[in-house]
Amino acid sequence: MRAPSDYPKLSLRQMLLTRAHLRAASPGLSPADQTRLAEAERLSAAALRPRPVAAENKARLHAGNVTLRRSDLFNDLAGEVYDLIVTNPPYVTNDETDALPREYSHEPELGLRAGDDGLDLALKILRDAPAHLSDDGLLICEVGEAEQALVDLLPQLPMAWVEFKVGQMGIFVVERADLVEHHARIRELADARG
């Protein structure tokens, strides 16, 4: 089994700068790139329970090109295709959720609990993302401390782990083509979770 440290490590900026169609999403934008991002035809933000802060941020940033959507993962996004999907699903294991201090009791359990290894939702996202990514699309997903568990489950899936100044933070990038190539195994794992 390959450890996360064996996978490529690039800064998010390096990853995005190598992708011409995503160049506008990188830090240090040129004026032309800033214009392209601001004039992007369509940007979407989806959540099962969108919070008022999303609408506030949209207004504060004058992001008229952002559509706020309600969806349980991809269930309500039929036919939607994106160049880039960025997701931060719950990734706290059942044991970790059960052991959380009392102050976490105000948090909705659905925003924390992600199965015995923390990957229940991430595997469903990996399974369903190809139908929502363009041919050259990328998925960026955070799995936190479930990073090693994911590598153990899918050792053949080429994931690039994002390196931050403080080290790895359990965030990977994977191309649609690789998700399609390994779809049978991903589907098997995701479907077994129910």
Image (cartoon, rainbow, N blue to C red):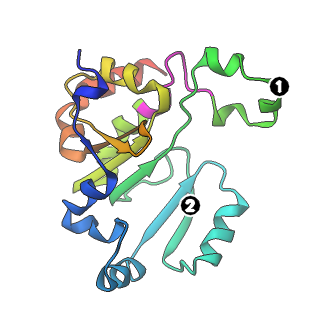
Relative to residue 164, is residue 151 drawn left or right? left
Residue 78: give x, y in percent of width and height: 42, 53
Q: Which mark is residue 14?
A: none
Q: Label 2 vs label 1: CA separation?
A: 32 Å
Examine the image and state in which quarter residue 130 appears.
top left
Is residue 193 a member of the stretch shown in magenta?
no
What residue appears at the point 75 percent right and 37 percent down from the top-left corner?
107
Q: Amino acid at mark 2?
A: Arg
Relative to residue 4, is residue 107 drawn left or right? right
Q: Secondary structure at mark 2?
A: strand
Depth order, front residue of 9/165: 165
Residue underneath mark 1: 102
Residue 140: give x, y in percent of width and height: 37, 47
Work out whether 10 lies above or below 4: below
Looking at the rendering, in which quadrant would you find the N terminus?
Answer: top left
Dot 2 alpha-carbon crowd within 10 angstroms: few under 14, some 14 to 19, many 20 or more? some
Relative to residue 192, is residue 4 drawn left or right? left
What residue appears at the point 28 percent right and 21 percent down from the top-left corner?
3
Q: Amino acid at mark 1?
A: Arg
Report the predominant secondary structure element of the magenta stretch: loop
The nearer-to-camera label among 2 and 1 is 1
Q: Which mark is residue 69?
A: 2
Q: Which residues are magenta?
A: 113-122
